[in-house]
Amino acid sequence: WYNQPACGDVIDRHSYKKAPTVSPDDTRIGVGGEFGGFGYSVDNHLWIPDQKTSSVYGTAVDKRHYEHLLVKVWKEVFEISNRLGMSAAVYTQLTDVEAEINGLLTYDRKVIKMTPELIRNAVLKQEFPELPKYESLVPTSEKEPQEYLYTLKTPASNWYMSDADRSLWLKAEGVIGFKKHRNSTIHIKTEWKTPEIWVARSFDLPKFPLKRPVIRIAYDEDAAVYVNGVQALDLKKGNNTRHTNYPMPVKVAKTLKEKGNIITIHVKNRKESQYIDVGIGEESITW
């Protein structure tokens, strides 16, 4: 895909994981030729039987998370269209295609991944449910620096477990990282420039139990996240440019306790900016 300047009748730009922003000019309409691309894996309906993550633009943790991403991005599309005069936007894609699990239907066309009425009302009627509300319980470093332990040396194989020896790890304040681009939401407090880092953060929960716990994280570039020794997220395929909420898988949420929790993360960087920051909260969904 290439947008030839000053040519044809359409200005076409693609945007993934967020809504396209395309304004018309004097002679051409503005179109978001592709946007979205959110992945969601449905067991027993995959081309690759054990595939858990999308090969392209990120993966939803569960159906509610997937619907949240869809509703949010469609709301943004209409807001941009009304503000800029964008003429059309094309969501990608209708069905899963082999290794790409970012379809609205599964590869075998047997499962519609979201509630049809929810998305139909959003797209055809511009009727949107109230977006999920987030309550911060273990804050990130967005407002105030939070304390971490970290190491830049490859740790023991059980580094992510609750009882791992971290006596030689260093203390740091978040956000930990290094930026090559401007980003007003990521405030680096401790510099990290090596290809890999392992971090740990202990926490208690001011309220317990939680109905829908979420992990709030900013990461660059790839991040494997564990809570109380159980893997919660495997965030590959890039980064997020701001703090983002990910619902905690059920098996991980079951490990939470009122006191004495720990979250451990391994982050890899391939190029340019790199950072890590994490917190825990609870999310409420109205639909």
Image (cartoon, rainbow, N blue to C red):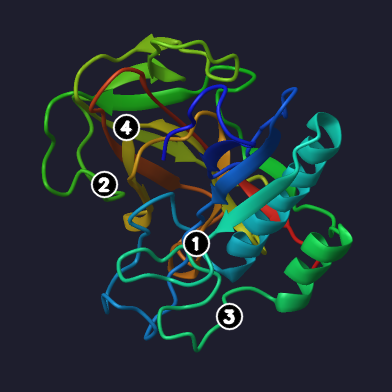
Say whether disc 4 or disc 1 marks the residue closer to the N-terminus: 1
- Judging by the rendered image, the residue that carries numbered circle 2 is 160
Say whether disc 4 or disc 2 marks the residue closer to the N-terminus: 2
Q: CA distance from mark 3 to mark 4?
A: 38 Å
Q: Residues within 10 Å of mark 1 (few under 14, many from 20)?
A: many
Q: Residue 190 vs residue 3: left or right?
A: left
Residue 263 drawn at (x, y percent): 40, 44
Say whether disc 2 or disc 1 marks the residue closer to the N-terminus: 1
Give yes or no for contact between labels 4 and 2 (Cβ–Cβ under 8 Å): no
Q: Nearer the viewer, mark 3 or mark 2?
A: 3
Quadrant of res 262? top left
Front residue (pair 132, 163): 132
Q: Report helix, strand or loop for mark 3.
A: loop
Observer able to see residue 207 = no
Q: Report helix, strand or loop for mark 4.
A: strand
Using the image, determine if residue 53 lies above or below residue 78.
below
